[in-house]
Amino acid sequence: MKTFLLIICLCAARVHGQTQHAIFVQPAYSTLSYRQHIPALSFSANQAAMARVTQPIAGVYGEQRYSLQELGVYSAAAIVPTRKGVFGGSVFYSGSQAYHTQGLGVAYARSLGKTHAGIQFHYIGNKVGGYENNAVMGAEVALQYEVSQQFIIGFQVSHEGMFSMGKPTRTTPLYRMGGGYQVSEDCFIGVEMIRNNLQSAYMQSVLHYSFMNAFHAWAGYSSGNGSASGGAGYTKGKLRVDVNVSYHPFLGITPGVGISKVIKP
């Protein structure tokens, strides 16, 4: 029964995430990439957001998808701004010894005034016990535009299977388009549409609110699988800690923890 449930969860993640790389981006981090001050891990959803980073940032994130140990997801990312542009890197691991996925990405972004552009190349490998391993390489291209100081819009196209190393896999490009509005210094609203050729477009949204100078909370919803999510966090100096949970109507609860820190030059 446990093995059967694991297979169902893996299929669900694949259907709603579409590309393996995309499913490791927590929905809130994805939509928060349209904020002026982004969390370190959100650049995986839109690499152009890195262009607005002015200080080195590093972060880690872990979650237990649907409360199953076999579906643990662990990722780390770092962003380093330079005079030649902003560079980023990320690594992730998901699964167990019987079945797991691992990969890495290298990204670059540059600001062109109000327009920001970013690109990322990534490698993803799958390993299933007793079967042939498989790996693919892909890329993401992203743009963001500052309509005003409060309003940012963006677009990203991702293609996972540009190069296949092993058994050929069928892939399709994934498109993201969204925007975020800073209602006030403390309140942010973000919306993002996601689409590919295998399913209808779906929406992710988030409401983020900061209070008491050090605390923040957020709530989000994804129409792709009808899941709701929420979380809270604490920021002290250069350190930020987030605790979040999402709820899938059929598969259950996914708890997660993220930590990021601004690194002093």
Image: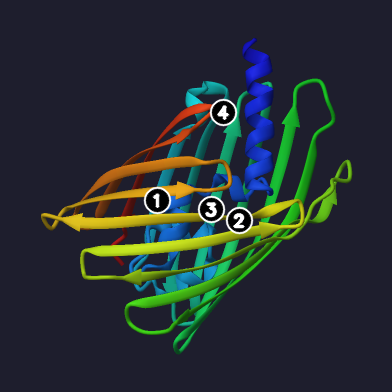
Residue 105, numbered circle: 2
Q: Quadrant of residue 180?
A: bottom left
Please name the amino acid that badge 2 sits on.
Gly
Task: Give the Cα distance between marks 2 and 1.
Answer: 14 Å
Q: Quadrant of residue 225?
A: top right
First reached walking from the N terminus: tag 2 or tag 3: 3
Confirm or deny contact between disc 2 and disc 3 (CB under 8 A).
yes
State which mark lies toward you, 2 or 4: 4
Q: Is residue 56 above or below residue 261?
A: below
* Element at label 4: helix
Q: Quadrant of residue 185?
A: bottom left
Q: Which residue is rendered at x = 52% and y = 22% of the image?
A: 68
Residue, disc 3: 90
* Element at label 2: strand
Please name the amino acid that badge 4 sits on.
Leu
Task: Give the Cα distance between marks 2 and 4.
Answer: 21 Å
Confirm or deny contact between disc 2 and disc 4 (CB under 8 A).
no
Residue 209, numbered circle: none
Residue 59, numbered circle: 1
Which x, y percent locates residue 197?
A: 76, 57
Q: Is residue 71 above or below residue 185?
A: above
Which x, y percent locates residue 14?
A: 68, 40
Residue, disc 4: 71
First reached walking from the N terminus: tag 1 or tag 3: 1
Q: Which residue is rendered at x = 87% and y = 42% of the image?
A: 166
Please name the amino acid that badge 1 sits on.
Gly
Q: Is residue 3 left or right of residue 78?
A: right
Q: Which residue is rendered at x = 38% and y = 77% of the image?
A: 151
First reached walking from the N terminus: tag 4 or tag 1: 1
